[in-house]
Amino acid sequence: MKLLLLLVTGALAGEPDVAPAAPPAPPIEAARQPPAAEGPPVAGEEIVVQRVLSLKKARAAVELALEAEGYTPARRRGEFTVYTSGGWQPKVLLHDDGWILVGWGRKGKPVERVKADVYSATQDAVRAMNDAVAARSSADRLGVEIPAELHGIWEKAGLSATERHARLFDYWDSRTDTAEGDAARTVVEQFLTAVVQRSDTPLTPAELSTLNARRHSRHALELVE
């Protein structure tokens, strides 16, 4: 019995140290929780994202039409993407603004027929891409340029809070009564709600009533708390 105890003790002494158990992994559901929001969304940001996706979709349609004609992208040349067919057919250049040029090709080949086929096959997709480019430019105006102008008014030194409020209202009121103007007014309203009304000097109901009394816009400015 004593010999057996010595053998067991010796075996245990020779065993390597066991690393401490790792802490349990966080529950799967907890790991999937989205991060907490850091603040209100940037005015016009959703419009920009939507227009960018629309432009990508429109460009993909042009590329699909060119692929159906046997063309694949070969390289970039400035603001153009050059597409080739691998044969004698003329090169096709697609501009980032949504229009195409078809090259001259080789002499003695039916180049004019190929050019006509390419233009015919891509005209609808190119027109849609051109419209998407214009919409993206409008989105940049709504999502980047207008918010920057509003911040410039709000942060301008030497103005009282009342003067800043009036200038922001005049910016809102001076937008045209069109779809584009309505979209711009929405961006201003978002800015007022997210920035001005959360500041130490928000627009008061009395100020808003006075400003609305001299408005030119069809509708009064209403701010959602």
Image: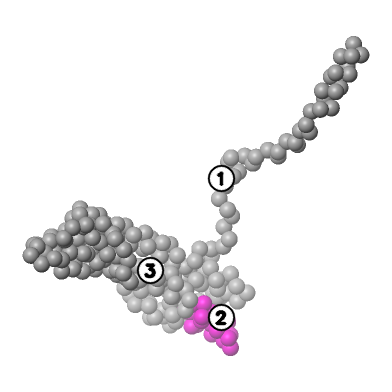
- Mark number, residue 166: none
Q: Residue at x 44, y 80 (%)?
A: 171
Near-viewer residue (189 or 128): 128
Horizontal and vertical percent position of residue 78: 33, 71
- Horizontal and vertical percent position of residue 74: 29, 60
Residue 155 tag number:
2
**Amino acid type indicated by mark 2:** Glu
Helix, strand or loop at label 3? It is: helix
- Seen at 21% across and 57% down, the residue is 85
Q: Which residues are magenta?
A: 150-169
Q: Amino acid at mark 3?
A: Ala
Label 1: which secondary element: loop
Closer to the chain start, of discs 2 and 1, is 1
Question: Does the CB distance between marks 2 and 3 fall below 8 Å?
Answer: no
Q: Residue 47 in the image: x percent, y percent?
A: 40, 64
How far, Cα to Cα, is label 2 from label 3?
24 Å
Compared to 199, does 12 lie above or below?
A: above
Q: Residue furthest bottom?
A: 158
The answer to which quarter of the image holds residue 163 is bottom right
* Residue denoted by label 3: 139
Helix, strand or loop status at disc 2: loop
Q: Nearer the viewer, mark 2 or mark 3?
A: 3
Please give the residue where the numbered disc 1 appears in the rendered image: 32
- Amino acid of disc 1: Arg
Q: Quadrant of the N terminus?
A: top right
Q: Residue at x 63, y 74 (%)?
A: 200
| Left or right: where 75 falls relative to 170 | left
Tell me the crowding category of disc 2: few under 14, some 14 to 19, or many 20 or more residues within 10 angstroms, Cα based.
Answer: few
CA gap between label 1 and label 3 equals 32 Å
Density class for disc 1 (Cα within 10 Å; few <14, some 14-19, many ≥20) is few
